[in-house]
Image: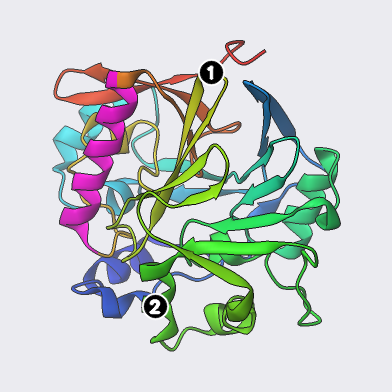
Amino acid sequence: MTLTRRQALLAGAALPAAAALPALIPAPAHAQAAAGGPARDHALGNFRVTSLLTGAMPMDNPREIYATDASEEDFAAVAEAGFVPVDRSVNSFTPIVVNTGAEVVLFDTGLSPEGIVSALQGAGYTPDDVTHIVLSHMHPDHIGGVMGADGAPVFGNARYFTGQQEFDFWATQANERFDLNVRPLAERFTFLDDGDTVVGGITATAAFGHTPGHMAFHLENEGRRLLFIADAATHYVFSLANPEWEVVFDADKAAAAATRRRLLDLAATDRIAIAGYHMPFPGIGFIETRGTGFGYVPASYQFG
């Protein structure tokens, strides 16, 4: 399903409350799936962090997606300053997989089983290698690779982790993708609250707003730190330049904006690298303060 200008406008109108969320976001079937990669490795101490590109989707009218309350003039000024077009954007879908030496932890699963399996193979993994699946939230582009077309789990050896509040919310909704991909695995999930540990060196961080129980994750090993912000910020220019701008896909826009500013300020102040699910591949970089907002500095050779 193509996200058109009309659909973006309707989506914005359809989100007065979180209860409107389940019918909102389709799995974008026209997104281009990655074939056998690409993948990009980063060394975080003794952890191997690999970015996986599972798809990319062109989108029109980014102001109606990332800044629904911004004036045309203000939005155009930010686009010009950020060297991006005012009338189009490209949305990447970039899970990360973390090899701790003892575990292989996959954060989110992309749009489809084919996309995530292909991307993992490009990084040298098979689905059976994955020991932990961590879902930041339940939007279709994050849970699309959990279950195969045959109704069997793609990751047969994995344990599953997600936020308690996130799971509880979606379990009360009539949402086909959740019901097909996540609900059947409920007994295999460990449910997380703020500060809970997934494995040693990986900690859950409440990042509510994009969805009712959206979670970020803090990784630390050998003094190196990385914050997987998932969808707390969904565009590397617009979401950072003005974190308070309203995003059409955020369920609670005020809470999402507060979360966005809090995480970006943490990353900038403590100089923590971030990984963003929708940042340009490989989706890992740094945050710096720019005026009243922030800027994105893509990682180059800092991680070896």
Rendered residue at 34%/63% (across/down): 211
Magenta span includes 256: yes
Q: Secondary structure at mark 1?
A: loop
Residue 77, above or below 250: above
Q: Secondary structure at mark 2?
A: helix
Query: Which percent across, then down, holds residue 251?
Result: 28, 65
Residue 25 falls in which quadrant of the image?
A: bottom left
Closer to the chain start, of discs 2 and 1, is: 2
Query: Which percent across, then down, holds residue 240?
Result: 29, 32
Query: Which percent across, then down, holds residue 12?
Result: 26, 66
Magenta span includes 19: no
**Image side of residue 253 versus residue 225, left or right:** left
Rendered residue at 24%/32% (across/down): 76
Predominant secondary structure, magenta span: helix
What amino acid does circle 2 point to?
Asp
Image quadrant holding the N terminus, namely bottom right
**Image side of residue 7 versus residue 93, left or right:** left
**Which residues lie in the magenta part?**
252-269
Residue 297, above or below 167: above
Could you say which disc has been placed on residue 226 in the image?
Answer: none
Could you say which disc has been placed on residue 168 in the image?
Answer: 2
Count neighbours of disc 1 (C-alpha within 10 A) and say few if under 14, some if 14 to 19, many if 20 or more. some
Could you say which disc has been placed on residue 299 in the image?
Answer: 1
Q: Nearer the viewer, mark 2 or mark 1?
A: 2
Q: How is the model colour-coded?
A: rainbow
